[in-house]
Every structure is written in C-alpha cells, then in structure tokens.
Image: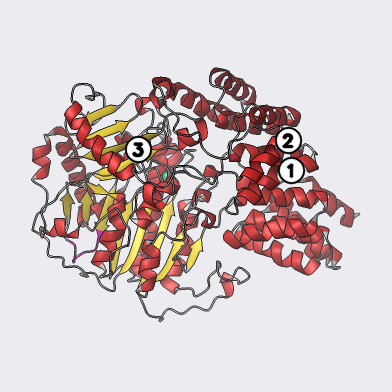
Amino acid sequence: MTRRLLVFGIAGLVVAVAIGFAISARREATPKATQVMPAGALRGANVLLVTIDTLRADRVGSARALTPTIDDFANTGLRFEHAYAHVPLTLPSHAALMTGAYPTRNGVRDNGTFRLGDASPTLAAALKTIGYRTGAFVGAFVLDARFGLNRGFDLYDDRMTGSPAGAADPDLVQRTAEQVLAPAEDWILNRASTNPQSNPQSNPQSAIRNPQSGGPWFAWVHLYDPHEPYRPPEPYRSRYAAVPYDGEVAYADAALGGFVARLRAAGALARTLVVVASDHGESLGEHGERTHGLFAYDATLRVPLIIWAPPKIAAAVFNDPMRLVDVAPTVLDLVGSGPLPGADGRSVRPFITGEQPFDDAGSYFEALNANLTRHWAPLTGMLRERTKLIDLPVPELYDLATDPDERQNLYAGQRDRARDLERRLDAVTRGAVPAAPAALSADAEARLRSLGYVVGSAPAPSRRYLAADDPKQLVHLNQALDEAAAEWARGDAGKAIDRLQGVIAERADLTVAYDRLAFMLRGSGRIAEAVAVLDGAAQAGHADRPLLRSLGSMLRDAGDLPRSAAVLEPLVRGDAADLQSADALGQTYARMGRSREAESEFKRVLAASPNDAAGWNNLGSLYLSSSRLADARTALLRAIEIDPAQAGAHNGLGVVYARSGDIPGAVAEWKKALELRPDFADARQNLARVQK
Ligand SMILES: [Zn+2]
C-alpha cells in the first residue's frame, strides 16, 4: 500500500514538473525505439475498453489523487500526454473512437438525432470477425442501442433506470458506475452465454454459464458518472462537497478500482489489453462554458488516454499527439487484425516502437450541436503540431505549447500558420457527410404545413454566418440555458421559466429554449401554456424534429389526440430511425384506442432498443387495456427484469394477477409499486379495492 501511494505521489510530481517546464523537457520522455512491439504482439489477448465520460485530462494523475485506479494503469502502461477527441459530445465522440473515422465520415454529428449507419466498420465488429466474444455495458441513454453503437456486440447492455420520455433531458438518463460494472464483471468472469439483445425474452438469471468456452473477449464499459448533474454518492459527496465534479470522478475511479481488483484476483487481466479513455472533458466555467459541447478548447477536447498490457507494453509516456480515431486501428494492429476500412485514424504502434518517425497528421474536430439545435455558426477546426485553428466567423488560432489555456488568439497576426491548418481542415470537410439529421420528406413537410407549421425539408442552403452568430458572442445564452436547468433542478420553477422567456426574447430562433420552456410549463401543471409555446414556435418557423415531437406529446397530454397524431405521424413516416417519435405516436394511438397501430409502433422501438424498460411497460399496458393478459404479463415482467424500479410495470402486473384471480400476487405487486412511488394513486386505489 505504501509503495502504491509512493508511485502515485511521484506521478503527481512528474506531471507538476512537466507543466512547469518547457515542452522540450517533456519531449525527452518520449520512449522512441525503446519498445519492441511487432504487429500482432498481443494476438489473442482480451481487450477491455474503459471510457469514462466527461473526464478532464488534468484530473488523471493530478495532485488531488482523485484517480488512483487510472493512475496505476498510467504508471504501469503507456500514457498519451496529448490525446484528443474529435467532438466534445458523448455519442459522436464514441462513434469516432469505435469506427476510427471522423464524424465527417461516420456521419454521427450530435447526440440524439444521429445514428451510426450500418456501413461504418467498427472495432467490435472487426474483433468479432476474428473470433472475439463482444460485450458492451453503457451508462447512459445517449448510447442506447438505437443510436447504432451496438453493432458488432454479442451483448449490448444499455439497461437504464428511469425513462428518457419522462426526463427533461434524455442525456441525463443514466446508471451508476457500479450498476454498469456489475453485469460487465459477471459477463467477463462467467461468459454468460445469454444475449438479452438477440433474445429479449430470455432471463439472464437462468442463463447457462460456460466459463470454459474459448476465444478472447472484448468488453467495453462506459462510466457516465462525471457527467452533470454532479451528485456523487457518499463518502464522495461530503469529501468533495466544494467540487462535486471531482467527487464523481473519484467515485467512478473507485468503482473501477473494485472491478479491476476482482478481475485481477480471478486472473482475468493476465492476458488483457486495457485501454482507458474519456470521450471529452468538462469546461467547469473556462471560457464561459459550464459543461461541454459548445466550444472546442482543451478543457473539453483533450482527453486522458492509456494503453496498458504489461509486460508486452512497457511503462512510458508518449508525448506526440494521439487521436481517439487512432485507438481502434492501434488495438487492431496489436491484436493482429487487419486495419479498419475507411478509417481516418492509424495505428500509432510504429511510432511507439520507433519503426517510423512520428509525423503529425493533424486532428480534426467539430462542435455542431449549437448549429444544429440553435442555428448558431458551426464550429470546426484542426489541431496540428500543438497549434489549434478554430474555424468560426471570428476565427481563432492558439499555440498550445506556449498558451495551454488558449487565451491569446494569434489568428490575425499569424495568417500563414492559420492558412496551412485551414487547408488541412478543408481537406477533411470536403465531401463530408452532410451535418444534418434526417430531413423531413416533402410529404411530411406538406402535412405539417397544413397544420400551420413552417418547417424546412432541408437545412438552410449555405447560410452565411456572421460574427453575431459566433458561439463566443452567444455564450451568455448558453449560460442562461444552463442556469435555467439548474434552477429547475433546485425546484425554482418560476425563476427558470422567467429566464427561458428572457432567452427567447433575445434570440427568437433558439429552438431548444422553447422545448425546455414547454417542458417546465408542463411540469408546473401549465399544459395549455406549454402547448402554446411550442405551437407558436412551430408556426413562426423555429421548429425542428425534437420540438415537433415534444409538441405531439404535449398535445396528447392536453387531450388533443387527433392533433397529436397529426403532428407525430409525419415525423415517424419521414424517418424510420426516429424511434422517440415512434414511441410518442404509439402512446397517442394507445390513448385513442388504436391498439393495433400502437402495438406496431412500440414493437418497432423495442426491436431497435430491446432494453427499453419504459417501452416494455408501454407495450404491457397496451396489452392490458386489450385484455391480452398473457402478453401483458410477459411484457411487464420484461420491463421489471430490465429495471426493477419501474413502478408502473409493477402496478400493471398487479392488475394482470388480480384479473387472473391471484389476489395475493396482485397485492404484492401493488405494494411494491407504492414502495417505489408512494404517491402512485392507481396502485393505492387498486390496493384499497381488494382490501375492502
Ligand atoms: Zn460524454
């Protein structure tokens, strides 16, 4: 223990020294030609990929000793001092990591509205082809199977607690590190042969274990905890009360530590290549950004990255730049597989061994969420040789070696340096997949117009963005959106609603603000006003697909079922991949008594997203209303199996049992529902009725 602590202490010191001295001092640490590591050096090794969401590079190996588990991997593995993400957002960043391709090529540009297409080769699919068993365990809805990262995985465990439909922001539907790691550990150690995805009706508890079955495994675990809201469990909550973000980081690392220790004790890490990475950092107020996704400064773009496989890979620090798109090609090179077709990344093994001199290919990045959801100027950029170009109406150029905090914009004075990066940026963006989610068809557009809504079937053609559209000029609106969310979370609805109304008054095309405002109005019992806000935005031409989907759902809640269906139907017919709209339409059909159509929508959602507990609950409730008791029982049990905290499913199951004559069974389910949700009126009434 003393020795471990000593190693961590030294690691902290090394980082402090490196920051304090010039870049040349750090370059000396590059282990050129010191590693002997031919292609296929790790043939047959297991691969454990750990991604810790929203983990800033500077939190690893920091003097605060937040991450002893990751530090241990860093001290005994290969640590990449300058590793970069390509998008500061969860889904597109993981898509780049898994495909080795930039978002311009793999097509995933934002959370929620994009899906990885079937044509993109992935790390999981490549490993599966050479005989790996593949399992993924993700911590947030934003990586749900419906968004396409499940391809190539035998098992994709995306069981969340809570429902995206009931959340202010689907990005926040998550589970804890321990909830992610427990099934991952079980899968790795027992190689459970069950596969909830391909066989949704199966029960993992009764799965046949087959520990002797051959072939290496590839496991991906994704820990979402450092993402906001920062609510670490105790003792981290108290210990890091001043910086709860650090508490989440420390909690995630500790959970990972337990997982790693148990795997090691079972001998499961003996022949395993471990990769630890983050998808992006967190701004924590730098440059006026509280979280991530708007800008592309190093606070969010630079990520921790470690590749660990002693004794084949010696402990070292690699100082030349590494990109997340290089991870999959490097792993495949090490385990002796062919490269990923169409990758932008490359294996960095030859640079580590000194077989080839390093040449900096440059790293592309983008942050398009504000462009796609707010009509602000699109942010793209290029990073090469420690120089970063951010291409915006007010362009920026930073020398990261001398100005790591990106305070001094050199663009005006160093045009030649900028021009070289601009050329490289153009080479990546030329011929890129268009940065727009599936557009509405002309027919869908016409149908929505007939309802009075102005929606474009295609993105505005080559709109010219002005300095006023630069996110730097609009960051205060971003802060206002964040503050409103924080006020809402604190229970201060009036303040949050006022703030959002102010935001809309300043910038009328801020689509996402209408959506959030309507959500808060509905949550405050002001459903008619919520509908009016969305209706007004859509009539004024500020609607996008998520806003129309919200409008359709709110019309249903307000009781206007025909109009709800009329808004949702064009969305669903216009894009088969828009499962959130399919789910909303299914609920509207169910309320209208159009059971067959509702069933078809729910089943479509569950086919793409088989671990959607709320979806199974919806389907079960639909069956229950059609008196299909056996079907209802199966669907509701499935919902509970995925998420035992689904109070609605327990209540429904109670009804199934009561109607089948099993009153004690029914009472037990209703009591369970009330335990989970004490204010659940239906469950209380059901219980009162039988106890009379
Ligand atoms: Zn993320």
Quarter placement of the C terminus: bottom right
Q: Which residue is mark 3?
A: 300
For image coordinates 72% across by 45% down, the residue present is 678
Label 1 amino acid? Ala
Horizontal and vertical percent position of residue 239: 40, 38
For image coordinates 80% across by 54% down, the residue present is 594
Residue closer to the observer: 528 or 104 = 104
Horizontal and vertical percent position of residue 554: 71, 38
Determine contact: label 2, label 1, CB under 8 Å.
yes
Work out how far the residue at label 1 is from the one at label 3, CA to CA, in angstroms: 41 Å
Residue 248 seen by the camera = yes
**Disc number placed over residue 245 in the picture, else none:** none
Left or right: where does residue 587 sit relative to residue 464?
Answer: right
**Disc number placed over residue 451 in the picture, else none:** 2
Q: Is residue 533 magenta?
A: no
For the image, the number of numbered tags is 3
Residue closer to the observer: 10 or 507 = 507
Label 2 amino acid? Leu
Label 3 amino acid? Thr
**Disc number placed over residue 566 in the picture, else none:** 1
For image coordinates 27% across by 44% down, the residue present is 363
Q: Which residues are magenta?
A: 308-313
Quarter placement of the N terminus: bottom left
Question: Which image quadrant is residue 268 in?
Answer: bottom left
Horizontal and vertical percent position of residue 273: 28, 64
Mark 3, secondary structure of its residue: helix
Q: Is residue 312 magenta?
A: yes
Residue farthest to the right? Answer: 692
Against 155, residue 609 (above or below) is above
